Amino acid sequence: MRHVILDCDPGIDDALAIFTLLAERDVEILGMCATVGNVPVDTGYHNLRNLAALCGRSDIPVFRGAQLPLVRPYAFDPLVHGEDGLGGVALPESDVPHEVEHAAVATCRLVREAPGNVTWIATGPLTNVALALRLDPTIGEKIDRLVVMGGSTARGNVTPAAEFNVWVDAEAWRVALSSGIRFTMVGLNVTHQVACTLEDYAEIKRMRGKVGQATNRMLSYYEAVYRREGWGEAKLHDVVAVLEAVQPGICGTVPCRVDVETASPLGYGQTLVNDRAAREEANCDVAMAVDAGAVRRRMLSAIASF
Ligand code: RIB
Ligand code: CA
C-alpha cells in the first residue's frame, strides 16, 4: 500500500489528476492540501473539498495552505482555469466539517503519524512543501519521493524561461531541491506530450457518472481556452505527475543537477537542468520521456470508475 499526500492548486488539470489518484486502489491518501496557484488558496481549498466529495471520498482530510508565495507577490489570473478554478463547473457543496490545521502543519503531522514511508505529490506551486520542510526538516526521513509537476528542460509557459508552478514561487523550489528529499521533476518537456484525443473526448462525453460529466464540462472549457490562445491541445500536466508517483516508470527519468533562478528579473523561475552532472551532484530525477497513451488510458478508466 502506497501512502500519499497530495498538494495542489485546483485548477482543471489538478481536478483530473485528483480523479485519477482517488481511483487508485493500492493507494492510501493521508490528506490533500490546497496551495495558492491557479486560484487563490480559499478557492482551491473549496474546490478540493468538493472534488473529494464528488468522488465519494469525503473521508480524505482536506487542508488549506499558503495564501501567498514565500517571497514574491501573488497576482491571480483567471485566464486558464476561470474565476472559480474549474471552468465555471459548479460542484455539489461538501458538508464535511472544516479542518483547522494549516496544510504545512498537517503535512508534518501526517508524515510523522504515517505507518510507513510517504509519497508526496505536488501539482501546484511548492509553497506548502517548503513551509512544511522548514517547520520540520526531519519529515524528509519518511518521504520516499516528492513527485512534482513543474519546471521544464526547455522553455516555460508563463515566460520564455519559467513554467507556472515554479514562476509563482521559485524560492519554494529552491528549498525543496536543497532538502535532500528524493525529488522527481515532471516538467513541461514531457507534459506537453500528453493531451486527450478526439476519441478520448468522445468517450468522456458518453460517460453518465457525475465525475465523468463534470470532467466533460471542465475539459470543454479548458480545451476552448487552449484553442482560443493558440496553445494547441489542452495539456494534462498534473495527471502525468500523479501517475508517475503511483505508477513509477510511466515517465523515463534521468538523474540531473537542477538549479532554479530566483534573482534574475527576466529569468526568474527558470529550472536549469544539467543532465551531465556528476552523480554526487545530482539532486533530481528529471522526466525526459512519457508513455502518453498509458497516461490517457489510465485517466479515462479512472474517471469512468466513479
Ligand atoms: O504549468 C502547468 C501547471 O501550472 C499545472 O500544474 C497547472 O495546473 C498549473 O498549476
Ligand atoms: Ca496545478
Image: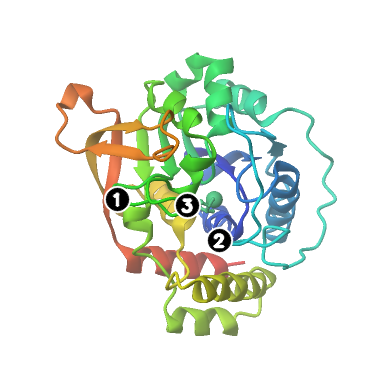
Label 1's element?
loop
Q: Position of residue 264 (x, y in %)?
A: 41, 32
- Name the element at disc 2: helix
Q: Which of marks 2 and 3 is nearer the N terminus?
A: 2
Q: Residues within 10 Å of mark 3 (few under 14, many from 20)?
A: some
Q: Residues within 10 Å of mark 1 (few under 14, many from 20)?
A: some
| Residue to which mark 1 is pinned | 154
Based on the displayed image, in which of its 4 quarters is residue 41 positioned? top right
Ranked by sequence position, the earlier of labels 2 and 1 is 2
Label 3 CB-ligand 1 distance < 8 A: yes
Above or below — where is 120 with respect to 106? below
Q: Position of residue 63 (x, y in %)?
A: 70, 37
**Which residue type does callout 1 highlight?**
Ala
Residue under label 2: 16
Q: In this view, does 170 lie above or below 190?
A: above
- Residue type at the position of mark 2: Leu
Q: Which of 229 and 33 is in front in this view?
A: 229
In the rendered image, which quarter is residue 61 located in?
top right
Residue 158 disc label: 3
Q: Is residue 172 left or right of residue 91?
A: left
Q: Which residue is drawn at 39% across and 39% down?
A: 267
Q: Nearer the viewer, mark 2 or mark 3?
A: 3
Q: What element carries label 3?
A: loop
Q: What color scheme is it? A: rainbow
**What residue appears at the point 39 percent right and 63 percent down from the top-left corner?**
295
Whether residue 282 is visible to the viewer of this picture, yes or no, is yes
Give me the C-alpha separation between circle 2 and circle 1: 25 Å
Whether tag 3 and tag 1 are in contact, CB under 8 A, the answer is no
